Image: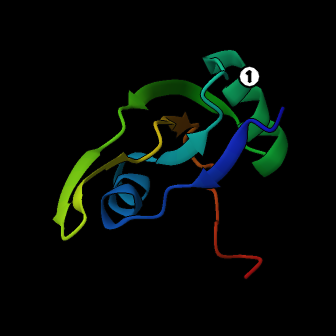
Amino acid sequence: MNILIKPIITEKATADADLNNRYGFQVNPKANKVEIKKAVEATYGVSVEKVRTMNVRPDRRVRHTKTGVQTGKTNAVKKAIVQVAEGDTIDFYNNL
């Protein structure tokens, strides 16, 4: 099971990384905090102090078209905010 899917690189997440040393990841919905902590430590070589998780609900959309009403939704995802130890950093841009 692949725990870490992708890092969250937004303006808000980058500011949180610079100020508070917290990094965001999109993770597998079945992963728990212990598994996320071990995966981040193994992948990036940092020591993790705290892991916060959140389940993001799917967005529902309704479109009115010529053929009728089209309904749909996006996928539900799980996000993790990882607090790393003081002095440790994660560089997402080193292997572009």
Whether residue 31 is situated above or below residue 95 in the rendered picture: above
Q: Residue at x 53, y 26 (%)?
A: 51
Residue 45 percent location from the top left of the image:
80, 46
Q: Residue at x 68, y 48 (%)?
A: 5
Colour convention of the picture:
rainbow
Indicate left or right for 7 with 46 as reference.
left
Q: Residue at x 41, y 27 (%)?
A: 54
In the image, farthest residue toward the left = 64
Residue 33 percent location from the top left of the image:
61, 19
Q: Nearer the viewer, residue 77 or 17?
A: 77
Q: Residue at x 80, y 38 (%)?
A: 2
In the image, farthest residue toward the front = 67
Indicate left or right for 54 with 32 as reference.
left
Is label 1 in a helix, a strand or a loop?
helix
Whether residue 61 is situated above or below residue 12 in the rendered picture: above
Whether residue 12 is situated above or below residue 2 in the rendered picture: below
Indicate left or right for 65 with 27 as reference.
left
Q: Amino acid at mark 1?
A: Glu
Quarter where residue 64 is shown: bottom left
Q: Nearer the viewer, residue 64 or 50?
A: 64
Q: Nearer the viewer, residue 60 or 69?
A: 69
Whether residue 34 is situated above or below residue 3 in the rendered picture: above
The residue singled out by tag 1 in the image is: 35
Q: Quadrant of the C terminus?
A: bottom right
Q: Quadrant of the N terminus?
A: top right
Residue 52 percent location from the top left of the image:
46, 25
